[in-house]
Image (cartoon, grey):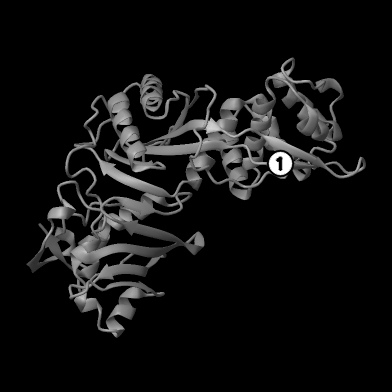
Amino acid sequence: MADTVRTYTYCQPHLHQRKGMTMAKHRGFNADRFLDKFQRFEQLLRDFVRLWEGRVDLEPATLDVPAMKRWLVEGTGQAKDELVEALYQVYDLCTARGHEDLIAAIAEEPSYAPDPDGRLPVECLALKVRTEREDVFFLAYDRYSLWRAERFSIYKGFAPRPIRDLRAAARSFQEKLAAVFKDHKHSDRVLLRWYEEGSYVNFIVYHEKRTRATLVFRGSKGRLKVEPHIYRPARQDFISYNAETGQVEIEAGYESEEAKLRRCFAEACLGEAEFFEHPEAAQRLWLGVLAEPYFEPVCPEAVRASLVELQFALAQSHGPVFTVRSKDVLRTLELNGLRRKLVPELITRAAFKITFPDDRRGKRVEISGPNKVKFNRTTHAEEVFALLADWGILVDEQVAVESCAVSSEPVPVADHPAGGNGRFSHLAASGTGTLRRPR
């Protein structure tokens, strides 16, 4: 496997939100409980507040936890919203997953050891890293943000193509997005962050306005409490590009914005706005293979998979549509005489449960349409795509789903246009099962 290289950059214009847009989902911020973690660690709060010294009405030298709580309610200053937002970002990483991402980002900087003894609570560690090494903090934050993204559209370009000058391409990408959003949303406020991980380049795009932080002071003098209304980036979009395969995965709030992100990315980073616009680019998933009488989601040793949900119509009058949920949908269909009635073109949605050795709960992978996939990408993302390829669901670019028809001649799995190309190509080589070739 190639060595993993990770690079990080950060661009920082302010963001704004257009009225009526859907807010991103985030955890509620319990400011009172969060700040209580800094009892005995007040110096970390003081160092953090010094980043905005002179722009907020706080005196870092004498700051303590009760004073910080009062300031959140009563304080002023031109940088108050910026400071409060930074607190929210720190709080976002105060989960088990966020802590893992933070530790991983720190580990990539051998010369930086913010907590050599491992004694700081995650709240204190995250605030310390945000104060001392903004680049390390936002690498962890971006990974955590990308982990929470689940619904992606997949496109494949004409051929694999590297991004030659990534820093220059990222700047150009942000400029193009700003120009497009100014025309589309009457705002050119865009924040773009990116990092590399193996063959992937991941971009996180923040845009739209933000809501204003409103925190309400409650409780007695002896027990100060802050009850906040959430202050968050209104929108985050994600682009993940694999230079070895030429495949891009995009999560955006609206299809029109997805198209703009896709074209801006292709023009700025790959030098060709039409790179993902050819007719087969979006024909990435073929659920028709599930109609094959011998289809089984075969896996390598220690990995298990089963089809747990299937939505399909039958070729009958009145157009009946069924959604079947079961621990083993294929077996359920057989028991009820429905499997032989499946028509490839009439299968609209499927969900698999894939269990890896280090993930006992299993990963749910939902597939719909020719290029929509949803699953938790925290772990095993590449393995999931490799399995989908070996099962014949993730297809090569020359297979256009809309023009597929079922031939009468069965062919071995290894000869299927989507089989035998992934990480688990030995499944196809084993000849397990029989598929019918789309054409």
Residue type, numbered disc 1? Pro
Residue sitting at x 43%, y 38% = 237
Is residue 8 positioned above or below 393 on the image? above
Residue sitting at x 19%, y 37% = 158
Residue sitting at x 53%, y 28% = 16
Residue sitting at x 25%, y 31% = 161
Q: Residue 45: where, in percent of width, then height?
A: 77, 30
Q: Residue 425: where, in percent of width, then height?
A: 25, 56
What count of labels does the image hold? 1
**Label 1 crowding class (10 Å Cα cut-off): few <14, some 14-19, many 20+?**
some
Is residue 290 positioned above or below 187 on the image? below
- Camera-side residue of 53 and 202: 53
- Camera-side residue of 204 and 165: 204
- Camera-side residue of 358 and 291: 291
Please state, as top left, top right, bottom left or bottom right, where the C terminus lies in the image.
bottom left
Going by the picture, which residue comes out furthest to the front? 19
- Residue 231 falls left or right of residue 408: right
Please state, as top left, top right, bottom left or bottom right, where the N terminus lies in the image.
top left
Going by the picture, which residue comes out furthest to the right? 222
Q: Residue 157: where, in percent of width, then height?
A: 23, 38
Residue topped by disc 1: 228
Q: On the image, which quarter does residue 437 sit in?
A: bottom left
Is residue 370 positioned above or below 139 on the image? below
- Residue 425 falls left or right of residue 407: right
Q: Is residue 430 visible?
A: no
Q: Residue 257: where, in percent of width, then height?
A: 36, 37
Q: On the image, which quarter does residue 243 sit in?
A: top left
Q: On the image, which quarter does residue 127 sit in?
A: top right
Going by the picture, which residue comes out furthest to the top? 54
SS category of the residue bearing label 1 = strand
- Residue 67 falls left or right of residue 163: right
Q: Is residue 9 visible?
A: yes
